[in-house]
Amino acid sequence: MSAATMRLASVERASTRVPVRTTPVNPVVAVVFLGAIVLIFAALAIFNVYPSARFAFIAAAVFLMLFPVGVGLLNTRLKPGVVRFDENAASLRFIPQAAAPVLFFAAALVGLVPGIVALVNGLDAIGRGLAVISALCLVWVLQQLWALRLPAGLVLDEHGIRGVRGSKAVDLSWDDLAKAEVTAPKGIRLTLHLRPAGSVVIEPQYIGSDPNVLAPVINFFREHPQHRAALATPRAALELVEAHASARAD
């Protein structure tokens, strides 16, 4: 796989402009809030007389530090107007960054530790709280492992759209797709509306690209079947969409 990026300036100017952020939460507020919780867990670890409980609180603090770092990577690496794709693929494949998913998986594994320690040493009130956190992390680990059954990214070819690692797999023919658009109920998302009804919502960490420009790319090939053969050459396909948007602007 050869990762490449391209700025689709003309497509961006003509597209819907939703702020490129994976979460609606202000990053500064999130960091301050999680930082306060980390300090509380750190204090509990320092002043707790039981080594096992100290270990559980340290693990909880590490978990809470890894998660915002992963979210921060997603927000900083998702660039407005830029798509990230596999230049050597046999079709147009939008690919994610690897760093944030790795951090999320590490955070989920670390998050299992407090609950395990709490179960071994007995569940008091704090232990039950730690066990709940670890139970949620176990679900998160299983979800990430289940997602590995799919190749990462979103593939466009002559036949349709498929791929994405997440809770839903995408496997659509072009006739199944009504349109693609950008939505922002909980941070920016790519939404594929289906015929005759229904939709698939894709989070940006699975595609590594700005949905503001990715949606128009998908819609272009949905509306222009005569150009779908170009999808076999990824860069040429993107240049075609950019040239079309530039010509319309002129």
Image (cartoon, helix red, strand yellow):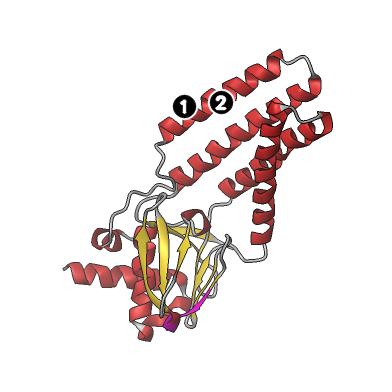
In magenta segment, residue 102: no
Q: Which mark, by number, is residue 72?
A: none
> Which residue position is annotated with label 2?
37
Relative height, residue 146 to residue 174 (above, below): above
Where disc 1 sits, the SS reads helix
Badge 2, how many Cα within 10 Å: few under 14, some, many 20+? some
Q: Residue at x 43, y 45 (%)?
A: 23
Residue 7 in view, yes or no? no
The quadrant of the image that shows the C terminus is: bottom left
Magenta span: chief secondary structure? strand
Q: Residue 202: x and y, percent?
A: 47, 61
Which image quadrant for residue 63?
A: top right
- Residue highlighted by disc 1: 32
Find out whether residue 173 is within the magenta segment.
yes
Give residue 82's position: percent from left, percent from top. Answer: 39, 56
Q: Is residue 51 above or below residue 120?
A: above
Percent across and percent down for residue 27 are: 43, 35
Most distant residue in the right direction: 120
Residue furthest front as drawn: 125
Q: Is residue 137 visible?
A: yes
The residue positioned farthest toward the bottom in the image shown: 226
Locate the N terminus by quadrant. Answer: bottom right
Q: 228 or 19, which lies in front? A: 19
x and y percentages locating residue 103 in the rendered image:
61, 43
Start-end of magenta stretch: 171-175
Please state which amino acid type lies under the numbered disc 2: Ile
Which residue is drawn at the image coordinates 57% and 39% (left, top)? 67
